[in-house]
């Protein structure tokens, strides 16, 4: 590790901020020694706030139908080989009941941008989950909607919203999405969500096509300035039925490095050890926790549909029952000195 990189890491830990060229340098000139120092500081900061607790979110994949055509995504509308399904309200409520029994206190309803889920239908689902499980948080992850729609869902009881920004560089954004989607609208959504009062999660893929250190530096600066409650990052993994089928996957090494950097940018950040990280390496999620992650999102979707929600190739945890997923993660977290908390797991500073 050069003296300059060491100085940048120590300054980031102190000031929670670097300039764009400094973030770029921190990524470009990294080595294993720099990664070790970052992880050591990241773990220390995480433990000061969260101890050894790992927050869990029960992920319910409500629909594999999507009107959008994001170029990297396995369920993009132009993939005519994708198997489509949509869960009914009853099925979603059953998943949340099962999840509650298993100890989940947050449910994440995630799906493609499926026009079936009007405000009326989604609000009813949110209200019913909250009525049955008032001590639980509901997170939505159903893409870009109008401000009025976000407001209606918030008023119905939704607490959090996940919407990955994907990249904080407009030119890069345009290379990953069709012309019908815009960077400006994505940013508008994120601002609206935050202003309405949601705990907002954003995030990006590590190693996505056309991404360089420059784009990643912009992502880090964006997280620093926007101040989300959560930031989900995982390695890009190509899907065989997309135009990016021949692209390389992102690496675990860089993902872990960036997890540590994000922890130093904001020690209170909710940082998931993602399923994509567990897909590129069998111990990816454990390594993510050791690099500073503090959230896992086991799958609560009915087993019959799991394989159909295939955003990228070889996604793990598609064959297990929900209880198996939670049990498996419990053991994995214990192996790195952590434990799964039975808790809503709000971002520090947010009140119920
Ligand atoms: S990334 Fe999301 S919005 Fe884009 S095609 Fe996939 S499911 Fe649809």
Image (cartoon, rainbow, N blue to C red):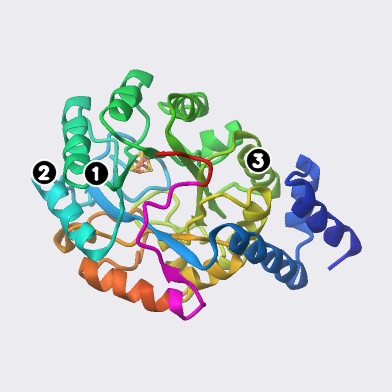
Q: Residues within 10 Å of mark 1 (few under 14, many from 20)?
A: few
Residue 41 is situated, as x and y percent measured from the top left of the image, at: 71, 64
Residue at image position (35%, 66%) is 314
Task: Using the image, determine if residue 325 lies above or below residue 151.
Answer: below
Report helix, strand or loop for mark 1. Answer: loop
Q: Are marks 3 and 1 in contact (CB under 8 Å)?
A: no
Q: What's the magenta region?
A: 333-347
Task: Using the image, determine if residue 280 lies above or below residue 86.
Answer: below
**Residue at the spot of label 3:** 224
**Residue at the spot of label 2:** 88
- Mark found first going from the N terminus, 2 or 1: 2
Is 98 positioned to the left or the right of 242 in the image? left
The residues bearing labels 2 and 1 have C-alpha atoms spaced at a distance of 21 Å
Residue at image position (59%, 47%) is 210
Q: Are marks 2 and 1 in contact (CB under 8 Å)?
A: no
Q: Taking the image as drawn, is residue 8 in sight?
A: yes
**Residue at the spot of label 1:** 134
| For discs 3 and 1, the disc positioned in front in the rendered view | 1
- Mark found first going from the N terminus, 3 or 1: 1
Q: Quadrant of the C terminus?
A: top left
- Mark found first going from the N terminus, 3 or 2: 2
User: Along the line of sight, which residue is nearer the eye, 135 or 327?
Assistant: 135
Residue 70 is situated, as x and y percent measured from the top left of the image, at: 40, 40
The residues bearing labels 3 and 2 have C-alpha atoms spaced at a distance of 38 Å
Q: Are marks 3 and 2 in contact (CB under 8 Å)?
A: no
Task: Using the image, determine if residue 125 lies above or below residue 236.
Answer: above
Residue 85 is situated, as x and y percent measured from the top left of the image, at: 16, 48
Q: Taking the image as drawn, is residue 320 in sight?
A: no
């Amino acid at each position: 590790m050069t003296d300059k990189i060491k100085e940048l890491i120590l300054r980031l830990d102190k000031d929670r901020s670097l300039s764009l060229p400094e973030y770029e340098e921190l990524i470009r000139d990294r080595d294993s020694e720099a990664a070790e120092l970052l992880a050591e500081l990241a773990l220390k900061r995480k433990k000061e706030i969260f101890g050894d607790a790992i927050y869990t979110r029960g992920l319910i994949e409500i629909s594999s139908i999507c009107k959008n055509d994001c170029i990297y995504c396995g369920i993009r509308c132009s993939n005519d080989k994708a198997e489509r399904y949509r869960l009914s309200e009853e099925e979603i409520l059953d998943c949340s009941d099962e999840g509650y029994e298993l100890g989940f206190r947050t449910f994440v309803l995630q799906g493609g941008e499926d026009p079936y889920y009007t405000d009326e239908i989604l609000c009813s689902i949110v209200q019913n989950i909250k009525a049955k499980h008032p001590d639980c948080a509901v997170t939505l992850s159903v893409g870009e909607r109008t401000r009025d729609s976000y407001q209606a869902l918030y008023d119905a009881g939704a607490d959090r919203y996940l919407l990955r920004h994907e990249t904080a560089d407009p030119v890069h954004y345009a290379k990953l999405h069709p012309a019908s989607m815009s960077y400006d609208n994505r940013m508008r959504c994120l601002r609206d969500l935050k202003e309405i009062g949601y705990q907002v999660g954003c995030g990006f893929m590590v190693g996505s096509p056309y991404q360089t250190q420059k784009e990643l530096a912009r992502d880090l600066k964006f997280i620093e300035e926007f101040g989300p409650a959560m930031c989900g990052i995982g390695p890009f993994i190509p899907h065989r039925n997309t135009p990016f089928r021949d692209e390389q996957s992102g690496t675990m090494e860089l993902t872990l490095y960036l997890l540590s950097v994000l922890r130093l940018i904001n020690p209170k950040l909710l940082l998931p050890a993602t399923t994509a990280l567990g897909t590129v390496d069998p111990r990816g999620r454990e390594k993510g926790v050791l690099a500073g992650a503090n959230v896992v999102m086991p799958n609560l979707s009915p087993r019959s549909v799991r394989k159909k929600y295939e955003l990228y190739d070889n996604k793990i945890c598609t064959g297990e029952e929900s209880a198996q997923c939670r049990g498996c993660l419990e053991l994995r977290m214990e192996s790195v000195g952590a434990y799964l908390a039975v808790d809503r797991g709000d971002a520090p500073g947010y009140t119920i």
